[in-house]
Image (cartoon, rainbow, N blue to C red):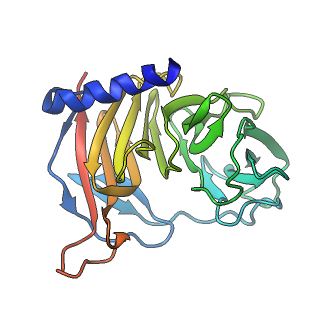
Amino acid sequence: MFRVRLLIPALLAALAGCAGPVRWGEPAAIEAPPPGATLTLAGGGPAWSPPAASPARLPEVAACPGSMRTARLLGNEWFATWFSVRPDSSVVLEGARSTDGGATWPERAAVDTTDRGTQGCHRPPPALATDSASQYVHVAYWLTAPEGAGVFFSHSMPGHFMFHAPVPVMYGDRPSRTSVAASGMFVVVGYEDPNAADPEVWIALSRTQGHLFDDRVSAAGGAAAPRVAVRGTTIAVAWERWNRQGGSSPAPDARGGERLMARTGEVRR
């Protein structure tokens, strides 16, 4: 029943079309980002922010290869998150905080320990974003919780380094790449629809720092690998175009058309 309740908002948003919670602009090609760049809203539309400086060092942990993500909050405060695999091929999503630019990582916390999957490290990495307005750290990811597989979200708690109980974004069995962005109380999670036969990119919107996701909105069909950004009530989504023959890639296709696309939207109040 819980899974059905999560699917209903997505179906209603799809049926609502242009009267839905987001007023979308037209998709347009966007240049491929340099390694480590993040999507941002600058001027009139989406753009790539140059890669931020890296922490002095990464946490010394037995992380799944490629799953480590880092982000700076303010000054020398850095955060990291990663998957660690258990002997039964499930994973634990873990986090760490450094206050000296990444020289040391003394604070550790579990983000999500509920995974019951058997994919081991063969799963999309988590998405990590920091928000200077709220000073929260936001994480979006796919795993198999006891009640079912799907996309989940968590954020750090103020004070002692720990994370809020995971919040389901969308249940579905297909491993899904995610992205997350936040500005104050407003949080946006981008994800590949874990129920679609062919990849589609959706976004989930929260006006309560991720404690509740009010709306789930289709951003693009035939799309994969979402990136999201938010500024005020304006959101941006970038994705890789997908086809059955070649999958997804940010490189130009055989006809010269760009595979990497983006669009902006205004959230209706």
Residue shown at 40%/53% (left/top)? 227
**Residue 15 higher or lower than 74, as above or below:** above
Q: Quadrant of residue 19?
A: top left
Q: With 115 as the anchor, is 264 left or right in this view? A: left
Judge by depth and name the residue closer to the eye, 32 or 91: 91
Residue shown at 67%/26% (left/top)? 165
Residue shown at 45%/44% (left/top)? 194
Horizontal and vertical percent position of residue 238 = 33, 55
**Residue 63 higher or lower than 12, as above or below:** below
Q: With 157 as the anchor, is 103 left or right in this view? A: right
Q: Quadrant of residue 249?
A: bottom left
Horizontal and vertical percent position of residue 259 = 27, 69
**Residue 233 higher or lower than 78, as above or below:** above
Residue shown at 43%/45% (left/top)? 191
Quadrant in which the C terminus is drawn: top left
**Residue 144 higher or lower than 185, as above or below:** below
Instruction: Examine the rendering and report whether any part of residue 43 can be seen.
Output: no
Horizontal and vertical percent position of residue 138 = 57, 39
Judge by depth and name the residue closer to the eye, 22 or 43: 22
